[in-house]
């Protein structure tokens, strides 16, 4: 697997006190164990690999690691995970950098297990503030709690951002085309921004004013919250796990693996945000690959029925009236019905050229108000890769099953709720979209409102 962001290291004076503060903020920090050099840590982590490490001196004495942690406060370094630390080190040498020799590391967990790794300091020594270090896990950690924090973005302000960019580019990180030496995204979707993004002023000084380090952590929380913890600006972002229907995702994955047959995943053809070619806007070289999206919808239908949440009835495609879709002509359709009070969820499959079932429509209510259409248009320019498109199909089902207000309509103005906000068509005054949804949720607005009870 290509190199990825692994963890941010934050030095604290009192580990238990710091872990309690993070936990009290709704971001659980759990004791991770002790290192042979005398440091101890607590981990902020969830089901994905990236995490945050709170570290403190846990023993008397002096060595480079203890001394660095004792003298530090707040973010002191960060790690990049690689599959082969020797090969990664060689890539940095070839790029003109001077990484230090590879060493061994380990930690004894509170359960008495040993977690081991190999690491390479890219900078002058342990926990260098200017450059990250490399880590190769030889005893990989198991996934963290399913409801734990997921690191989705980290923003750093290194003394020399171009040197850090050299490291990331040498290790194969994908850079965004607009800021090719400042904004990156790793294979797990973690974003890394090196500040300042803009060019320095004529005098060489940065115009950036703000926290040196910030984090975006996804949590199954009801709303977005900002914290300032140990010199880190932390944004806790609500994610899909807050929806009860997210519990169906393992069953969806199992059904999807069985139903997809030989249909393959495909990467984002514009991974670094590179602009599409002009001819890509009028072509689709492989419409058949989008049938994978239709199979994902089938997997959702199967999972919903298997969980006993409702029934699925195939219907003639023209039996469903779609509000918000005038172009597609489905060849297959299913209506899912749950318990009393829930809105029916309509699913339809439409062809793209000779590829039947390549387009997927998901809607709620009768008539069915479109929550999602994938692919959006089907041209190569708009293709964002199978992982992103499949995730969007998942979001539509999660939203459809979640209940509450889905749509508020008034004439040609429409506000449609999305997983993390809303989308709108028509002209609105500032803030009207949020007010429409809030008024509908509170019962102050009933005309043009599409709402129902949650399925789960």
Image (cartoon, rainbow, N blue to C red):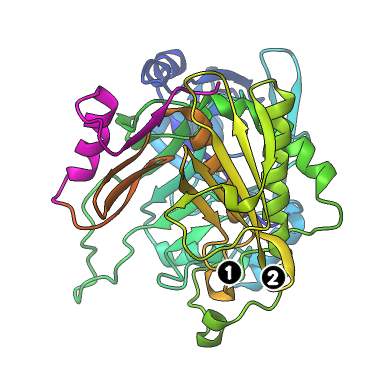
Measured along the vertical axis of the image, is residue 270 above or below residue 338? Answer: below
Task: Pick the residue in front: 363 or 314.
Answer: 314
Q: Residue 98 appears in which quarter of the rendering? A: bottom right
- Compared across the picture, whether 401 is left or right of 22 comes to right
Image position, residue 95 (x, y; %): 61, 72
Give whichever of 213, 434 is nearer the camera.
434
- Magenta extent: 429-456
Mark drawn on residue 92: none
Q: Are marks 1 and 2 in contact (CB under 8 Å)?
A: yes
**Residue 288 in the image: above or below residue 193:** below
Earlier sequence position, callout 1 versus callout 2:
2
Left or right relative to 209: residue 116: right
**Helix, strand or loop for disc 1:** loop
User: Which residue is nearer to you in this view: 85 or 143?
Assistant: 143
Residue at the spot of label 2: 287
Q: Is residue 451 magenta?
A: yes
Residue sitting at 56 percent across and 29 percent down?
45
- Please give the name of the residue rendered at 59% of the width and 53% of the height, measured from the top-left corner: 318
Whether residue 138 is visible, yes or no, is: no
What is the spatial separation of the Cα atoms under label 1 and label 2, in whole angstroms? Answer: 7 Å
Residue 196 is situated, as x and y percent measured from the top left of the image, at: 31, 61
**Residue 378: numbered disc:** 1
Q: Is residue 185 magenta-colored?
A: no
Say what secondary structure mark 2 lies in: helix
């Amino acid at each position: 697997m290509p190199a990825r962001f692994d963890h941010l290291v934050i030095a604290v004076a009192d580990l238990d006190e710091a872990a309690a503060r993070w936990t009290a903020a709704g971001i659980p920090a759990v004791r991770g164990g002790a290192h042979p050099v005398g440091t101890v840590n607590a981990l902020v982590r969830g089901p994905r690999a990236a995490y945050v490490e709170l570290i403190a001196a846990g023993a008397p004495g002096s060595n480079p690691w203890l001394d660095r942690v004792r003298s530090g406060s707040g973010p002191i370094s960060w790690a990049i995970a690689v599959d082969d630390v020797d090969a990664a080190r060689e890539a940095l040498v070839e790029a003109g950098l001077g990484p230090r020799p590879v060493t061994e590391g380990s930690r004894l967990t509170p359960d008495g297990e040993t977690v081991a790794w190999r690491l390479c300091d890219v900078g002058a020594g342990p926990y260098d503030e200017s450059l990250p270090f490399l880590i190769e896990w030889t005893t990989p950690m198991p996934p963290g709690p399913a409801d734990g924090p997921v690191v989705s973005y980290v923003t750093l302000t290194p003394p020399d951002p171009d040197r850090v960019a050299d490291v990331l580019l040498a290790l194969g990180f994908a850079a965004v085309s607009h800021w090719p030496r400042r904004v990156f995204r790793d294979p797990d979707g973690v974003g890394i921004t090196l500040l300042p993004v803009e060019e320095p002023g004529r005098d060489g000084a940065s115009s950036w004013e703000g926290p040196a380090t910030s984090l975006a952590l996804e949590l199954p929380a009801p709303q977005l919250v900002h914290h300032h913890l140990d010199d880190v600006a932390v944004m806790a972002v609500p994610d899909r796990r807050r929806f009860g229907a997210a519990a169906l995702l393992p069953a969806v994955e199992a059904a999807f693996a069985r139903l997809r047959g030989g249909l393959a995943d495909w990467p984002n053809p514009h991974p670094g945000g590179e602009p599409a070619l002009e001819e890509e806007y009028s072509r689709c070289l492989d419409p058949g690959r989008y049938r994978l999206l239709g199979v994902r919808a089938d997997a959702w239908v199967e999972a919903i029925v298997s969980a006993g949440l409702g029934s699925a009835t195939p219907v003639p495609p023209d039996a469903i009236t779609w509000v918000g879709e005038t172009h597609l002509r489905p060849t297959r359709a299913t209506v899912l019905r749950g318990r009393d009070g829930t809105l029916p969820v309509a699913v339809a499959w439409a062809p793209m050229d000779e590829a039947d079932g390549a387009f997927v429509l998901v809607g709620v209510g009768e008539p069915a108000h479109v929550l999602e259409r994938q692919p959006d248009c089907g041209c190569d320019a708009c293709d964002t890769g199978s992982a992103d498109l499949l995730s969007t199909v998942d979001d539509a089902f999660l939203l459809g099953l979640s209940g509450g207000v889905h749509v508020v309509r008034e004439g040609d103005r429409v506000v449609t709720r999305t997983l993390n906000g809303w989308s709108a068509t028509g002209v609105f005054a500032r803030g009207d979209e949020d007010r429409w949804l809030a008024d509908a949720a509170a019962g102050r607005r009933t005309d043009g409102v599409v709402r129902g009870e949650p399925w789960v």
